Image: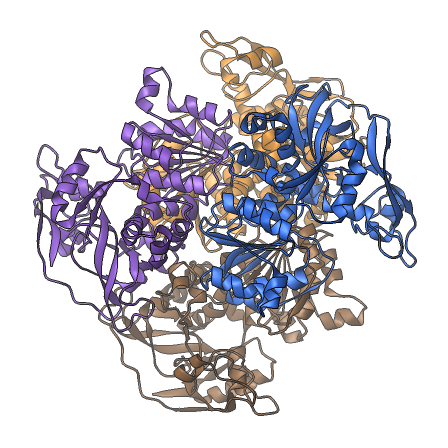
Chain colours: A purple, B blue, C brown, D orange
Amino acid sequence: MKGLVLEADWKPREGYTLTEFERVTGKAVTGSSVWKNPRLRLRDVPEAPVGPRDVRLRPRACGICGSDVHFYETDPDGYMLYPGLTKFPVIIGHEFSGEIVEVGKEVRDLRVGDMVTAEEMIWCGECTPCRNGYPNQCLRLEEIGFTTHGAQAESLVIGAKYCWKINELADVYGDVDRAYEAGALCEPTSVSYNAMFSRAGGFKPGGYVTVFGTGPIGFAAIALARAAGAGRVVAFEVSPVRQELARKVGADFVYSPADLERQGLRPRDVIMEVTRGEGADMHVEAAGAPPRTIPEMEETLAVGGKIVMIGRASDRVPMYLEHFQTHAGQVFGAQGHSGYGNFPSVIRLMAARRIDMTQIITSRFPLDRAVEAVQKAIRREDGKIMVRS
Amino acid sequence: MKGLVLEADWKPREGYTLTEFERVTGKAVTGSSVWKNPRLRLRDVPEAPVGPRDVRLRPRACGICGSDVHFYETDPDGYMLYPGLTKFPVIIGHEFSGEIVEVGKEVRDLRVGDMVTAEEMIWCGECTPCRNGYPNQCLRLEEIGFTTHGAQAESLVIGAKYCWKINELADVYGDVDRAYEAGALCEPTSVSYNAMFSRAGGFKPGGYVTVFGTGPIGFAAIALARAAGAGRVVAFEVSPVRQELARKVGADFVYSPADLERQGLRPRDVIMEVTRGEGADMHVEAAGAPPRTIPEMEETLAVGGKIVMIGRASDRVPMYLEHFQTHAGQVFGAQGHSGYGNFPSVIRLMAARRIDMTQIITSRFPLDRAVEAVQKAIRREDGKIMVRS
Amino acid sequence: MKGLVLEADWKPREGYTLTEFERVTGKAVTGSSVWKNPRLRLRDVPEAPVGPRDVRLRPRACGICGSDVHFYETDPDGYMLYPGLTKFPVIIGHEFSGEIVEVGKEVRDLRVGDMVTAEEMIWCGECTPCRNGYPNQCLRLEEIGFTTHGAQAESLVIGAKYCWKINELADVYGDVDRAYEAGALCEPTSVSYNAMFSRAGGFKPGGYVTVFGTGPIGFAAIALARAAGAGRVVAFEVSPVRQELARKVGADFVYSPADLERQGLRPRDVIMEVTRGEGADMHVEAAGAPPRTIPEMEETLAVGGKIVMIGRASDRVPMYLEHFQTHAGQVFGAQGHSGYGNFPSVIRLMAARRIDMTQIITSRFPLDRAVEAVQKAIRREDGKIMVRS
Amino acid sequence: MKGLVLEADWKPREGYTLTEFERVTGKAVTGSSVWKNPRLRLRDVPEAPVGPRDVRLRPRACGICGSDVHFYETDPDGYMLYPGLTKFPVIIGHEFSGEIVEVGKEVRDLRVGDMVTAEEMIWCGECTPCRNGYPNQCLRLEEIGFTTHGAQAESLVIGAKYCWKINELADVYGDVDRAYEAGALCEPTSVSYNAMFSRAGGFKPGGYVTVFGTGPIGFAAIALARAAGAGRVVAFEVSPVRQELARKVGADFVYSPADLERQGLRPRDVIMEVTRGEGADMHVEAAGAPPRTIPEMEETLAVGGKIVMIGRASDRVPMYLEHFQTHAGQVFGAQGHSGYGNFPSVIRLMAARRIDMTQIITSRFPLDRAVEAVQKAIRREDGKIMVRS
C-alpha cells in the first residue's frame, strides 16, 4: 500500500546525550535534537496484519497538523523543528477518519463498513496513570503518525478501542465525504474539549471566554465555547484568513494583537472592555506563546477565572501568582484527547450541529499529492488542509 | 399606590397545630393548612420608606407564577392550594423587573433610571447557611410576594443587594418594553440555572438532557440546556400550546406522555431511542410529579447521569437506588435562585441572545387588569402571562 | 492444585425466563433465580496457564465476604440467596492478597516475589464506559470468585493490570503475615473509598459522617471517615461484637437501632444531638436496608449533605425528595472499587497507619478448613474471617 | 479602654502617586510606599458604640502575626515593610478570641458570656463578588487590625456575622484559657483550610502533601493535611525551632532546604524519594518565596497534582507550564478565610481533637506588655506569640 513516509537521519546534535530509553527504543524524546534532514515521500509500505482486537481501516480524510509541518521544516543546521517524541521512518497523519475494512476476531462493537474516527494516543490501559484514570498521561504511550504508522496512507491498522463510530454524521451532513472530513477533525477538537471541559471543568453558561491563537485547536476552542454557552467569545489572531474563520466558527470578537499594538493597545485592554470590566472566566492558550499571552490573561482574570494551557512551549513564563490569589484564579495544564467521554461528546456535538468544524477546511488534496499538501501548510495561509481518499 | 393584594382568613384547619414560629410571626409554614377564603383585588396600599441600603423601583413587568395561581385557587374546603411559607395580606408578584426611582443613601452601585430585575428570596446574609455559601437555605428567609410586598404594584422597595442591572438588554432587544419582560423572566430562569449548573454541576457539552414538565421553569431548563451545548434536549409535556413553546425555546424532541400511553409507550422508551440507547446525562424534574417522572428517569440514566429535582411535591417517591449504583447515578435537590452568579449569568445569556425567554410570553395585561391575568392563568392555556406597567 | 469450589444446579425457577445472555454465556444475571442446591468443597482443580500479560500468584490471605455466605445459604426452595451475576462451578474468594510466583512475558511492573493485592472486577478496558472512565460500569465485566476462579485456592492467574503491590506493608507491620491480611482487606476498603471519595467527592474536613451497618464495608467507611478528618463519626449497628469493632476502627459514637427503639428513639434523634442540630454532611448506607435507613438520613441531612449508597438492596425506597431541595442535598449511588486511584490510595493509607483494617479480623482458618470458615461466617458473630495460606 | 495603637506618618514616597481611592479614604493600598516612622504603644482609646447587629467582646487571646511585625519594622528609609491595605492610626490584632460582653438589639445567635472567635475580613455581603459567593474577593473589604480597630485591646466591637462560637472548646480542653488560645488560632488555620479545601478542592485521602514554609499558616497546613488523611506530609523549613513544631503538628518528614543544599540536594530530590517516585498530590506554598519554591513543586508534581499558593510575594515566578500539561497539573491562588464553612469546620476539627494548634504557641504576654511581644516576634524565634487578657 502507499503511505506518506517521513524519513530522517538519526544524528544526535553535538552535546546531546541520548538517554537509555532513546538508545533502546530508537525513539527520540526530543526529536529536534536527534533527527536531521527530514524527507517526505509517498512510497510503498507493507500492510500490517490485523490482530484479534484490531481493525483495519481505509483512511478517507486526514488533516495536516502543525506537528506534521514541524516534522518537515528544519532549522539552519538541518534538524527538524518538532521537539517531541518521534520514531522514524513513519507514515505520518493522526487527524483522520476512515471506513472499517477488516475486523479482528475479538472485536465486538465494530463492523466492516462502519465509519469511524480514532484517537491518536495509543494509551496502554495498564500503567498506573491509565488505571487511575489518566490515559493522556500514559507511561507507555505510542502515538499514531509519530512513533507508529499513521493515516496518510491507503490502509491503517489500529486497536478497536481507539475507534469511535461516526456513522450518524453521514445523515447529519447528508454527505459521506463531509462526514469523513468532520470525523477527521474530531481529534483536534477533542484536544480542546479535553482541556476545557474534562481537565479544567468548563465554565458556567454565560461565562466570558477568550482564545489566544486560532490554529485548529483554537478554532475548536472557539466553537466549543460558543456551543457551551459562553456569554462572549473573544479571539486573538494575527492572520486575516484565520480571523475570518474564527468569526465563522463562533467568535463574537476577533482582534489582531499586532493591530492593537499599532493603536497603543494590548489584548488586556479590549478584554476588559468586552467583558464589561469583569474579566474572563476562562482563558484558553492555544497560541503556544505563553510568555506573551499569559500576562494578558493574568491581568484580565475574572474572580474565580481559569487559564487553560493547551499550546506547547518550552519557554518559562514569568507569572505573577499574586493575581491568582486576589482573584481566586487557577491554571490548568492539559494535553491529549483520550478518556472522559471526549470523543463521543465531540461527535454528539457535531451530530447535533452545535458545532461544524468542517468550516475551517480551506484546501483539499488527494493522497497522491500529500507532499504538496504539507508544503502548502508551511505557507500558513490555511485554516485546515485535508487529504482526502 | 395601587397593589394587587391577596387577603385570606387565618383559620388553621382542624387538627393542625400552629407552631411557635407561626404564632409569633403570623407566617404560615404550610399555607394550605392555615389560609382560607383567599381574595385578590387591586387596592391602595401606603408606600414603604426607602432605607439606607434600599432602592425603590417602579415595576415595569411582572409575571404570573404558578404559586400566584395556587394562592387564589382553593380546595373543596375553601383553603388555598399553595402549601408553602406565606403571610397575608400581601401584594403578590415576584418575577419582575423595573426602573429605579429612588436610592438609599448608602447604595453605591445603582442609580435612578437604572433598569433592574431582582431576586425574590430575601436571604439574610448572616445566618450560618448564608455565611457558608447557601443563601437559598437561609434560615430567616423572607420572600417577596409571599411574606413581604411584591411587584404587582406601582412601587416596590427592596434591598439594593437583591437587584441586578439589565440596562444592556434594552440595546440587545432594541426595545425597552421587551427588555423589561426579559428581565421579569430572570427569576424563573435563574431557578433552573441554579439547579442545573450551580447545584448539580451541569453536564458536559454534548450530553443528553430531558426536561419533564414545561411550565416556565421547564422552558428555562430547555433553553439553558440548549444554550449549554446539550447534544439532544427532550421534553415531556401534555399541553399542545406548551409543546409548541418547548420547541421554540430549544427542545429537539417533544413528547406528550398521554399520547405515548395511547401508543403503549412510556417516556423511557422514547428516551432510550433518542439517546441511542445510552440514556440521559441529565434529567430535569420540572413537573412536580416525581412519583410519575422519577421512575422514567431512573430507567434511562446514562452512566454517570444526574437527576435534578426542581418541581415541588409532597409525595414520597418509591425509588430504586440500585439503578444509581449500577449506573454511577446521582440525585440533586434544588430550590431558589440566589447566589453562585446565577442572576448575572442568566442576564449575560440573554444579552448574548443565547437564550430568549420572551418567546414564552403568550398574554399581557396592564396592572389594572391584574386580577383578570391571574384568572386567565388558572385556565393553564398560556406559556407565561405578563403584567405590564 | 486445591481450590474451594462452589457448585450448584442450573435450574431456573418456574416463571423465570432466561435471557439470551444467560443462555449463551451460562452466567446467571440473577443468581438467586437460577442456581439451586449450592455445595461447597475443597477439591483439585487444574492450574490455569499464565498469559503474556498475566501473573500467577499464590494466595496468602483471602477474606470470607457476605456474598460468599449468600452463595452457600439457600431459601426454603433450595435456591441460593445471592442475587447477582454468577457462573458455577467456580472457586470462590475475591478479597485477597498473595505472592507473585510467575509473570507473563509482557508484564513489566511486577516481579516474582512481589507481594500484591488485586481488584476483583475484571473490567475490559475497551467498552464505552471503560473508555469514558467508568471501569466499575464495565459492560463486559467478569468477577473473580463469581464468574471466574477466585483466591480460595493454592494458585490464581490474573491480569497484571488488576494487581497492586503491597510490599511496603511488610515493613509497616513488621510482619509479612499481617501485611498479607491487610492486603486482603484492600478490596472491601476500596469499595468504601470509591463510594465516599471517588464517586461522592468526599466531605470537607470537620464534616459529620454517619455509617449505617458495620460489616466490613461499614468498618472501612468508619476508618476512612476518621482518617479523612470527619468531625464526628457515628455508627449504627445491632451486633455487640461489631459495635465494639466499630469503635476500634474509629467511630466516635456507636448506637444500636434496636436499643434506641426500646428507649423510644430513632437514629434521627441521636444524629441531630451528636451533630449539634446541624445534621450529617455525609451519610453512608452500608446496611443494605435502605427502606429503614434512608428515612433516618433524609431527616438529618446537613445543608449541602450527601447520602452515599453502597449497600445493595432490591427494595424500592419511599424517598421524600423535598428534603433534598430544602437542604441542597444529594444522593450518590456507587458500586465497585476499580479506577480513580482507589486501590493505591487505600494502600497508602494503610502504609501510613492512618487506617488499620486488620483490627476487624476476628477468626483465621487455613485453606484446608475453608468450608468451616464459610460456615462460621453464617453465624454472623465475626468482624472478618480470614483464610490464610 | 486600652489598645495597642500603631501610628505612622502619611508620607507617600517620592515618585508614588496616590490614587483617588487613597486620597478619599485615607487608606494606603500599598502601605510600604506611604507610611513612615511607625510607632507602637498601648494607649487609651474611646470605646466604640455597639450597633444593632454588632457585639462587643472582651478579647481574651490575640496572636502576633507576621503582618503585625511588618507594620513595625522599617526599611532603610524609615518606611514600614507591610505592603498591603492599611489605615493608621489603628489598634492592631486580628487573630483573636474573646468573650461577648454586649449584644446589639437585632443579634439573635449570640449571648453575653458566649466564647467566640471572629473573621478578620469585614466582607460587605453586597458587592458582586460577595453575592456570587466570593467573600474573600469583596470589593469593599475592611480588615480588622489593618483598616479598623483590632483586638490587641480591652474591648472590640464587631458585626455579629463575623463571629463563630467556640464554647465547646472549653469542654474539649478542660481549660477556658487554652480554649481561647485555640480560638485565636482559628483565623490563620482557616486561611490554610480555605486555600487547601475550599479553593483547591483538597486531595484524596492517602495523597502526598508538601508544605513549604512553616509559619503559622504552614503549621496549620501541616496539621490539616494530616487530619485530612494525607499519606505523607513533608515540610520544608530552615528554623530548627519550627522544624520541631512542624513534627509536633503532624509532619512525617521535615527538611531544611539549607541543610539539603549542603548535601548537594534540593527539595525535589527528597520529595521524589519520600513519595516513592510518584510526586506530591498537593504542594502548599506558605513560604512567600515562590521563585525558590515553585520550581521544586513543578518538578515533583504527581499526575493530577495541585499547587496551592497561600504565601504572598510580589515577585514574578518563572514557571514551566509544560510540566502542568504533561502531568495534568493545576495551580490555585488563594487568600482569606471567610465563607465556605471554613471557620466552623476548623472549630469542629479542634473540638474533635483532630488538630491541636495550641501546640505552636511558644510565648505568652499580657496586654500590658504587648509592645514587647511584637518586639520578640521580630527575632523570629517563636512558633506563635500570644497576647492574653
Horizontal and vertical percent for residue D59?
71, 31
Which residue does the image show at 33% across and 18% down from the upper left?
A261
Name above or below for residue A341 compared with residue D30.
below
Q: Quadrant of residue B137?
A: top right
Which residue does the image show at 65% across and 63% down from the upper left?
B292
Horizontal and vertical percent for residue A283?
41, 35
**C201 vs A261, nearest the viewer:** A261
Q: Quadrant of the N terminus of chain C?
A: bottom left
Which residue does the image show at 60% across and 30% down from the upper left?
D128
Residue B187 visible in the displayed image:
yes
Horizontal and vertical percent for residue C77?
59, 92
Q: Is residue A13 left or right of residue B353?
A: left
Horizontal and vertical percent for residue D29?
53, 18
Name above or below for residue A367 compared with residue C97.
above
Q: Quadrant of residue C222?
A: bottom right
Q: Quadrant of the C terminus of chain C?
A: bottom left
Residue that sits furthest to the top in the current view: D14
Residue C251 visible in the displayed image:
no
**D170 vs B300, nearest the viewer:** B300
Which residue does the image show at 66% across and 75% down from the upper left?
C239
Q: Total number of numbered labels?
A: 0
